[in-house]
Image (cartoon, helix red, strand yellow):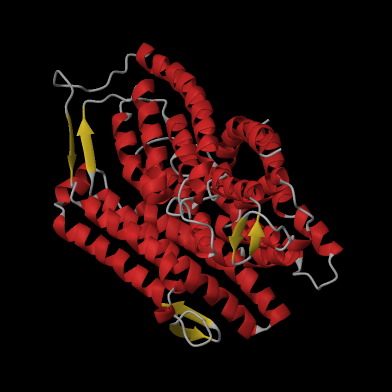
Amino acid sequence: MKKIITLLCIFCSVFFLCPVNVQAAESTQAAAVPVWLCIPFAGLLLCIALMPLVKGEWWEAHQPHVVILWVLAMAIPFAIVYGVGEMAETVLECTVNDYVTFIILLFGLFCVSGNITMEGDFAGSPRVNVGLLALGTFLASCIGTTGASMLMVRPVLKMNSWRKRKAHIMVFFIFMVSNMGGILTPIGDPPLLMGFMRGVPFFWSLHLFPVLLFNMIVLLFVFYHVDRRMYRRDIAEGRKPDISKPGTQFRIDGLHNLIFLVMIVVAVILSGVLPGLKIFQDSAGNVLGIPVFRDVRLSIPSVIEIVIILAAAGLSFKTTPKEIRTRNHFTWGAIKEVAVLFIGIFITMQPALMLLRQVGPNLGLDQPYQLFWATGALSSFLDNTPTYLVFLTTAGTIGFTSGISTSLGTVPVHLLSAISCGAVFMGANTYIGNAPNFMVKSISDENGVSMPSFFGYMLWSLAFLIPLFLLDTLIFFL
């Protein structure tokens, strides 16, 4: 039975990744990117999904070697098709302008949040957990899904440490805090920041609050009943929270690190604002940057962002006692694993993104429900930021005359809403759909939580998220 489920999940993954691109590629007159160049990306995803189940210890020891293998499997054929120079430029472009800023942001938030500890006698009961998930979801739009995830994950784990059945708590944590909560502001999730950089008003996405509120109510209702059942089973087995003092005791240590968290948020905002200022542009309007190779440049705004984030991380470690990190069970394992796996993902997914950019405008998508599901399905496996931009560009070139005026064209509100929700919400469908997902999984694993496998997690998303997204479609996008 398990083998059948695994095969069905593999089939679903391939279905999401390939057929739309293949059919669209065949329908366009231009020479399409060869679909077989996407095989290394699919191969790496399957390794991430299956190797922990098949050879867990070997996988832990040889992740870097597997990543290098799949990167070479993409880079060498790519060089044969397009030339060595084009291959080098493509790899360096995604590494310098996407991966470096991505991993440094994760690193900064990981360091700063690891120096904040919340302690108290709050037991991980269903009501407390509902409150924590609601708080984290709203916090995500203020400090980003990554920031909220890194800040909240350890307190949630600590308050539920006495429980045996808690993997479901972290699954719903990923659903809500690591993804859906980022929908209300450009700070919340990178796709919305890209929209802001292209003319979408900063506070426009606040009007998506009804969609977020509806999803929160549904998911928190379901979560409460699932968690109550697991809670009662833990209690029935004699498990009890360790509350040694009467009354409610609660304290936060390392609170000064909130200053460094704000520094990181400011750095992210500046990365979206500074490129539009003339002082950071040359005479032709191009953003100034440090030359790397051919047209690849590390932009000055990105350098400023990196410096601020690294400064915040360094100051956080300098000013926080080591004892706080010890109480947080702070280790470098999670960030190392994410850094290794995501460099492979970023590089090997480039042919898939190229294919998507090429065929996106020819897909014939002009209805909200179509854009919601197309953006969401691809954002579940590919980086949701370029996916968002492809479909935003598609909507902007249709020729609408009323809606939100962007640098890519006028986009009707209902289409922009569908694209935004698809990119942000459906990143929760897989562990790799959004950066914090895998980080939360790794930290949970380190803290003794038996998290679902890659496909096991997808079964959770199929059971709880897909029905919710169908309701979203009926209520908001038809």
Rendering coords of residue 208 (x, y %): 53, 42
The answer to whether residue 256 is left or right of residue 46 is left
The correct choice, above or below, for 43 with respect to 308 in the image is above
The answer to whether residue 430 is left or right of residue 321 is right
Residue closest to the far top? 236
The residue depicted at 28 percent of the width and 54 percent of the height is 261
Rendering coords of residue 246 (x, y %): 14, 18
How many dots with numbers? 0
The answer to whether residue 334 is left or right of residue 437 is left
Q: Is residue 354 visible to us here? A: yes
Q: Is residue 451 visible to us here? A: no
Residue closest to the far front? 402
The residue depicted at 54 percent of the width and 47 percent of the height is 424
The quadrant of the image that shows the C terminus is: top right
Instruction: Find residue 28 and report its image quarter.
Output: bottom right
Q: Nearer the viewer, residue 286 or 59?
A: 286
Rendering coords of residue 245 (x, y %): 13, 21
The correct choice, above or below, for 198 with respect to 167 in the image is below
Instruction: Find residue 135 and report its image quarter.
Output: top left
The residue depicted at 49 percent of the width and 67 percent of the height is 98
Rendering coords of residue 282 (x, y %): 47, 86
The residue depicted at 74 percent of the width and 62 percent of the height is 361
The quadrant of the image that shows the N terminus is: top right
Instruction: Find residue 260 and report its image quarter.
Output: bottom left
Q: Nearer the viewer, residue 202 or 327?
A: 202
Q: Nearer the viewer, residue 167 or 360?
A: 360
